Amino acid sequence: MADFSGKWAFDHGENMESLVDKLKIDPAKIPKDRSTTVEITQNGDNFHIVSAGGGRNRDMSFTIGKAFVDPDILELRNKEIQVTPNWNGNKLVLTGPKGTNSATREIVGSQMVVTFNWEGTVGKRFFNKA
């Protein structure tokens, strides 16, 4: 099980514009600056994640194996979508209700990489330890 604890600062993204288009998210809701930070508190299978950037703060808490309404999806798409977090090796995977769409966090080298997969369109966000 990976330890994601700590503060992470956004470095860069890959293919996020295509993902935003696919999800039909209003581009105005996506932070344009590079000041986005994510602070993760992890206690075993319990997580508390605070995201800040673009003048917005989001806060979520969850436990591995227990479905919850993802506040990011609610804010960005105005939809209450239940996701279920699970471990896949050292990857933290949040999977949507159909089991196909996902957001995966993993540590690669010194970075946290968040990979979003929505109906075959993949976007990635890379964060450095702050």
Image: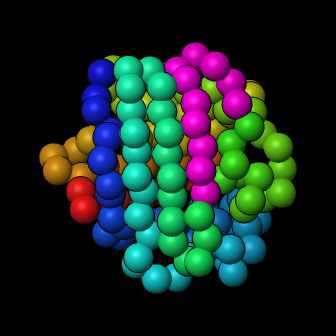
Among the 4 quarters of the image, the one containing residue 35: bottom left
Count the marks.
Answer: 0
Principal secondary structure, stretch drawn in magenta? strand
- Front one among 41 and 68: 41
Res 66 seen here: yes
User: Quarter of the image containing the N terminus?
Assistant: top left
For the rendered model, the colour scheme is: rainbow
* In this view, 81 is above or below 11: above
Place of residue 73 in the rendered image (x, y in percent of width and height, measured from the top left) = 71, 51
Q: What span is in magenta?
A: 58-68
Place of residue 111 in the rendered image (x, y in percent of width and height, measured from the top left) = 24, 52
User: Quarter of the image containing the C terminus?
Assistant: bottom left
| Outermost residue, right side | 79
Taking the spot 28% from the left edge, 32% from the top edge, the residue there is 3
Taking the spot 59% from the left edge, 64% from the top edge, the residue there is 57
- Front one among 74 and 124: 74
Res 120 seen here: no
Taking the spot 32% from the left edge, 39% from the top edge, the residue there is 4
| Outermost residue, top side | 65
* In this view, 91 is above or below 37: above
Taking the spot 63% from the left edge, 47% from the top edge, the residue there is 118
Place of residue 11 in the rendered image (x, y in percent of width and height, measured from the top left) = 31, 69
Residue 111 placement, left or right of 124: left
In the image, residue 62 lies in the stretch drawn in magenta: yes
* In this view, 107 is above or below 96: below
| Outermost residue, left side | 109
Place of residue 33 in the rendered image (x, y in percent of width and height, measured from the top left) = 46, 83
Residue 16 placement, left or right of 3: right
